[in-house]
Image (spheres, grey):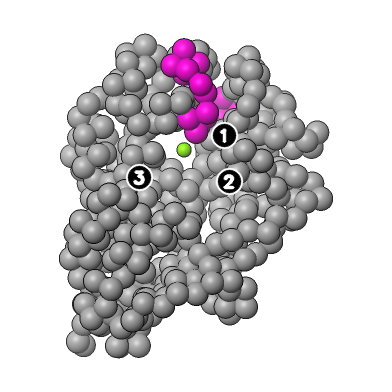
Amino acid sequence: MAAPIVTSIELLEFSYTRPDVAPHEKTRAMLYSPGATATLKARALRVYTNSGIIGGYVGGNATEYAGIPQVAYALIGKNALAREAFYTTAKQALKQHARMGLSQIDMALWDIAGQYYDAPIYELLGEFRKDLPTYASTTPGDDHPDGLSTPEAYADFAEQCLELGYPAYKIHTWREAPMKKHIDMLTAVANRVGGKMDLMLDPASTFMTFADAYKIGRACDDLGYLWLEDPYRDGGVSAFGHRKLRQMIRTPILQTEHIRGLEQHVDFIVADGTDFVRIDNDYDGGITGVMKIAHASEGFGLDAELHGPGPERRHVMAAIRNTNYYELGLIHPKMGRAAPPIFLDGYSDEIDAIDSNGNVQPPEKPGIGVEIDWAFIERNTTDRTVFE
Ligand SMILES: [Mg+2]
């Protein structure tokens, strides 16, 4: 069959609502807010081809989509299977803009390839395994009595996740709290479930100083945490600062969520800035980009850990040997995820999505493997742009 040629690219913005959710007034983090209804915006894109195959992707944000007009026309008339050609074209065209927009189109091209070859993406990548060990990744803390407002609440939720079958629990802590409260919480969680599940901490670069990072690192050492991720306000980007931190604490650290793409990840590894390598389909050049970084990490003997859930990430994880956990989140004892309800076929990344062994699996249909609810997206579309 002749290669599918790209004829047009459609960008959609749509709205949806989620109960008991409100964005934090400063950080915009989605927090538990009983009785509130958040009206949220999400984005999707479709790449159309002359073969009738349409590649779809749902996800990304306005910043990422802002880069797409700079590369969309370069793809019209091109072979939709030539992903490396698009990767290098888009990487050059968006070099001043952190390559935002490359990733989302790349994932739609992988969806096209899967349909063209009649195979799920993980098979095209080369399957390693289909059972993906999964960690419960919490929302940031809140201040509601039945939410994640106290150290004991985080410990209760860890125990709930352990009982559901999760082998690991990653804490996103409060965005603004005294260091003592954070450390009390780490202690409460470790006392409750330590030794029964892997524990990780992700302050998401909220702690203000290197000293805060050091204090929290020492606490993680004492309590046996598996990794400490993006502890402080360098923003997660200083290889030098994290090399220093690694020399001062024993807990492995996980960096590179906040840097972009293959070369910067390799530079960070070579500079001794991290123990685990963070990779993200939406930030690092799509499936094409994260597989490059996963293989580069493999060459250094390191593990590459995927950021966030979603069907495309399941396909990627299923094809990587040197990785440990699928990140299912962000979840909370009382609130569903803030993500839009756009997958059919029973696909879910909610708290009860794991099987009895604590795993999720990649979906099995060709391409991304799961039907996207385009009717829902079209009913709720608030903006549409077509390049042709
Ligand atoms: Mg993180």
Tag 2 secondary structure: strand
Is disc 2's CB within 8 Å of ligand 1? no
Residue occupied by mark 1:
172
Span shown in magenta: 191-213
| x then y, percent, for residue 257 | 39, 39
Q: Earlier in the sequence, mark 1 or mark 2?
A: 1
Is disc 1's CB within 8 Å of ligand 1? yes
Mark number displayed over residue 279: 3
Q: CA distance from mark 3 to mark 1?
A: 18 Å
Q: Does the CB distance between marks 1 and 2 fall below 8 Å? A: yes
Task: Quarter of the image for the C terminus: give it.
Answer: bottom left
Residue occupied by mark 2:
330
Q: Earlier in the sequence, mark 3 or mark 1?
A: 1
Q: Is residue 296 left or right of residue 319?
A: left
Looking at the image, which is closer to me, 240 or 216?
240
Q: CA distance from mark 1 to mark 2?
A: 9 Å
Q: Is residue 7 left or right of residue 267?
A: right
Amino acid on which the number 1 mark rests in the picture: His
> Residue at position x 31%, y 59% from top?
102
Check residue 202 for magenta coloring: yes
Check residue 215 for magenta coloring: no
